[in-house]
Image: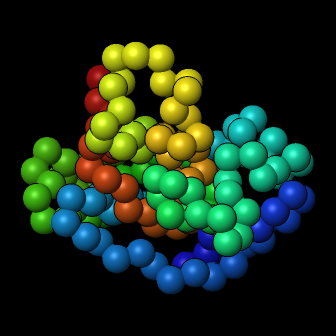
């Protein structure tokens, strides 16, 4: 599948990558729309900022450049992994673009934890791919009225 991948300052490439494998507790999303936000532009023009350079993995995700960008997106669920029971195939969804490690108290100011304890932005959500899998808890159903 095609994906827009960040390699470094001024270097984003659209290339073929393997399609991710659906695992227990994850959701497969066919991305319909993906925005380009200020964080994406700052990464491109000044980065890496949030995206760790190649060989320097993020402490939460273990990922480093090159990485697929895009963290503001919506789509349609095309598959659900074992154990996912509150999301159904065909539902329209958005994704919260972060992962918080289990021992972080979200009732307090999260700013001190952002670089080491919380995985943010393009390190989580890869909206510039055709398909993506995210942790079930990050996927939010869009209610049509």
Q: Nearer the viewer, residue 135 or 62?
A: 62
Colouring convention used in this rendered image of the protein: rainbow
Residue 47 lies left or right of residue 19; in this view the side is right
Please identify the quarter of the rendering in which residue 115 is found: top right
Residue drawn 36% across the image and 43% down it: 101
Residue drawn 26% across the image and 50% down it: 136
Residue 102 lies left or right of residue 117; in this view the side is left
Please identify the quarter of the rendering in which residue 29 is found: bottom left
Residue drawn 38% across the image and 62% down it: 133
Residue 72: where, in percent of width, then height?
56, 41
Q: Nearer the viewer, residue 85 or 9?
A: 9
Question: Quadrant where the C terminus lies?
Answer: top left
Q: Nearer the viewer, residue 133 or 59?
A: 59
Residue 89: where, in percent of width, then height?
22, 57
Q: Residue extending furthest top?
A: 108
Inspect this view and state whether residue 95 appears: no
Residue 113 lies left or right of residue 96; in this view the side is right
Residue drawn 67% across the image and 54% down it: 51
Position of 61 relative to 143 (above/below): below
Inspect this view and state whether residue 112 appears: yes
Position of 34 relative to 25 (above/below): above
Task: Give the total number of marks visible in the rendering.
Answer: 0
Question: Quadrant where the N terminus lies?
Answer: bottom right
Position of 55 relative to 102 (above/below): below
Residue 66: where, in percent of width, then height?
68, 70
């Amino acid at each position: 599948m095609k994906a827009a991948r960040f390699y470094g300052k001024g270097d984003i490439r659209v290339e073929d990558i393997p399609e991710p494998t659906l695992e227990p507790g994850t959701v497969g999303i066919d991305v319909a729309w993906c925005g380009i936000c200020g964080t994406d532009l700052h990464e491109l023009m000044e980065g890496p900022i949030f995206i760790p350079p190649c060989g320097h993995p993020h402490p939460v995700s273990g990922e480093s450049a090159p990485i697929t960008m895009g963290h503001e997106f919506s789509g349609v669920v095309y598959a659900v992994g074992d154990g996912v029971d509150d999301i159904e195939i065909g539902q329209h969804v958005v994704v919260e673009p972060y992962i918080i490690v289990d021992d972080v108290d979200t009732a307090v100011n999260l700013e001190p934890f952002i670089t080491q304890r919380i995985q943010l932005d393009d390190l989580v959500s890869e909206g510039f791919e055709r398909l993506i899998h995210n942790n079930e808890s990050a996927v939010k159903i869009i209610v049509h009225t």
